[in-house]
Image (cartoon, rainbow, N blue to C red):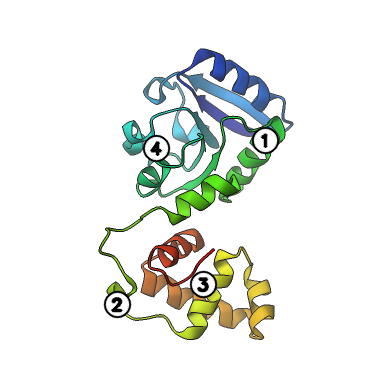
Amino acid sequence: MVRVALVAPNPALRIGLHELLAANLGLTVSAEAGDLRELEVAEDETDVLVLAAVPLTQVAEELSAWRAVLVLTDDAGEVPRWRVSHGGTWGVLSTSATQEELGAAVLALAEGLWVGAPGLLTAMLRAPFFSDSASADALIEPLTARETEVLQHMAEGLANKQIAAKLGISEHTVKYHLSSLYAKLNASSRTEAVRTGLHLGLISI
């Protein structure tokens, strides 16, 4: 059973989301509150934290302790500023997400996957991650043509096996390129590598 902690300042919204989440098989709302600081549950007693209409800039430090966070918002503008400080798994959906969308997102996050509504996710990935002066010239070592191809296919959502088939190379070679990419882009995950590549103008989506 996936345990969900729900935070929503608006009582009516919180009640509605509780009902939608609880209606999904395999999910249980273990705690809820109007403010994250008032949530009476430990981080290790919850699988996914769901935030609805919460000013993220006000709780950025507290969020770093949670391993999986689902943000419900219709404005992706403030999310990029928060995701920099959050090292765990995260997702973003509209506040009007359906029961099925909420359930699928929470289950995916509990499994360690990143999720998001296409429009919001694209806006987040395109948002500045580094300073305005950042450019491809800032890389310690430039990407090779092959590494750029691998990064582009990653941005398109292809798995290692699919990238190998596309480029006519082995899956082991793809993993080698990924390791090199992470080092050059100072990234620790596929998502971070993609968003860095997007910001530096190395790839596009």
What residue is at 41 percent from the left and 80 percent from the top?
A: 143
Alpha-carbon span between mark 4 and mark 1: 21 Å
Say which element carries label 4: helix
Closer mark to the observer between disc 1 and disc 3: 3
- Would residue 112 appear left or right of 148 to someone viewing this image? right
Q: Residues within 10 Å of mark 4 (few under 14, many from 20)?
A: many
**Disc nearer the start of the sequence (1/2):** 1
**Disc nearer the start of the sequence (3/2):** 2
The residue wearing badge 1 is 103
Is mark 3 in CB contact (under 8 Å) with mark 2? no
**Disc nearer the start of the sequence (2/4):** 4
Closer mark to the observer between disc 4 and disc 3: 3
Q: Residues within 10 Å of mark 2 (few under 14, many from 20)?
A: few
What residue is at 59 percent from the left and 31 percent from the top?
A: 3
- Would residue 98 appear left or right of 199 to someone viewing this image? right
Q: Amino acid at mark 3?
A: Leu
Alpha-carbon span between mark 2 and mark 4: 31 Å
The residue wearing badge 2 is 140
Position in image of residue 196 (x %, y %): 41, 63
Is mark 1 in CB contact (under 8 Å) with mark 3? no
Position in image of residue 106 (x %, y %): 61, 38
Q: Nearer the viewer, residue 32 or 167?
A: 167
Q: Residues within 10 Å of mark 1 (few under 14, many from 20)?
A: some
Name which quarter of the figure residue 63 lies in. top left
Q: Amino acid at mark 1?
A: Gly
Say which element carries label 1: helix
The residue wearing badge 3 is 151
Alpha-carbon span between mark 3 and mark 2: 17 Å
